[in-house]
Image (cartoon, helix red, strand yellow):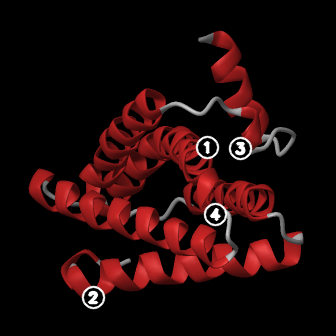
Amino acid sequence: MTALLKTYLNLCLLSDGPQDLPYSVFLFRILLGLYFISGVLSILPSSTFTESVMVMCVDIFVLLVFCWFCLRGFNKSSRYNQMMSAILGTGSLFQILAWPLMFYFEMAEAKNTVIPELGFLLLILISWNLAVYAHIFRHALSIRLSVAFLITLAFAILSIASRQLLFPELGA
């Protein structure tokens, strides 16, 4: 277990790739559940439980389908399990890190207080998360980093657009 956690930390530090994770359907399912739960917790401070669950269902659907199409387009379908395990595991870590920031952000908003440091920390966390996703796409698709960043940007835009389209009352 500690070796697996170390691999995820190394993924977040951009030193390991998804190929360093074991191919495991069990791990994939566990990480899918963890990603869902951590996502619900990170959204919960700004919405109801039902809305949080629905947003995460859409988020996971978009993530799974987008990655499948990317791998299919680059003829690398066999890498789906490890790529998704990498994205779901690192995504869970980032959502866990974002949860207290979102909680404090909502508390500050309720008091009509502006705390620029919270916004800055959230921006750093989101940027780091996108860099890790680009790193994972680069390894999984065997492409240049610049192309991986464009694919990551396309994913982020698609994810935000689907949230805004289906849940306009929640904002982005």
Name which residue lies at 51% across and 67% down: 68
The answer to whether the residues at label 4 and label 3 have Cβ atoms under 8 Å apart is no
The answer to whether the residues at label 3 and label 1 have Cβ atoms under 8 Å apart is yes
User: Which residue is at the far top?
Assistant: 2
- Reading the chain from its start, which is encountered first: label 3 or label 2? 3
Q: Residues within 10 Å of mark 3 (few under 14, many from 20)?
A: many
- Reading the chain from its start, which is encountered first: label 2 or label 1? 1
Instruction: Specify whether 90 is left or right of 159.
Output: right
Find residue 140 and report its horizontal and vertical position in percent.
73, 57
Q: Which residue is mark 4?
A: 123
Which of the 4 image quarters holds residue 130?
bottom right
- The span from disc 1 to disc 4 (Cα, nearest Å) is 27 Å
The answer to whether the residues at label 3 and label 2 have Cβ atoms under 8 Å apart is no
Find residue 94 and report its horizontal and vertical position in percent.
56, 45
- The span from disc 2 to disc 4 (Cα, nearest Å) is 23 Å
- The span from disc 3 to disc 1 (Cα, nearest Å) is 5 Å
Instruction: Specify whether 134 is left or right of 172.
Output: right
Name which residue lies at 41% across and 28% down: 26
- The span from disc 3 to disc 2 (Cα, nearest Å) is 31 Å
Q: Which residue is mark 2?
A: 165
Which of the 4 image quarters holds residue 32?
top left
Q: Which residue is mark 3?
A: 18
Name which residue lies at 67% across and 63% down: 76
Hey, what amino acid is under mark 4? Leu
- The span from disc 2 to disc 1 (Cα, nearest Å) is 30 Å
Q: Which residue is mark 1?
A: 82
Tell me the mark number nearer the camera, choosing from 3 and 2: 3
Hey, what amino acid is under mark 3? Pro
Find residue 54 and report its horizontal and vertical position in percent.
18, 62
Secondary structure beneath label 4: helix
Hey, what amino acid is under mark 1? Gln
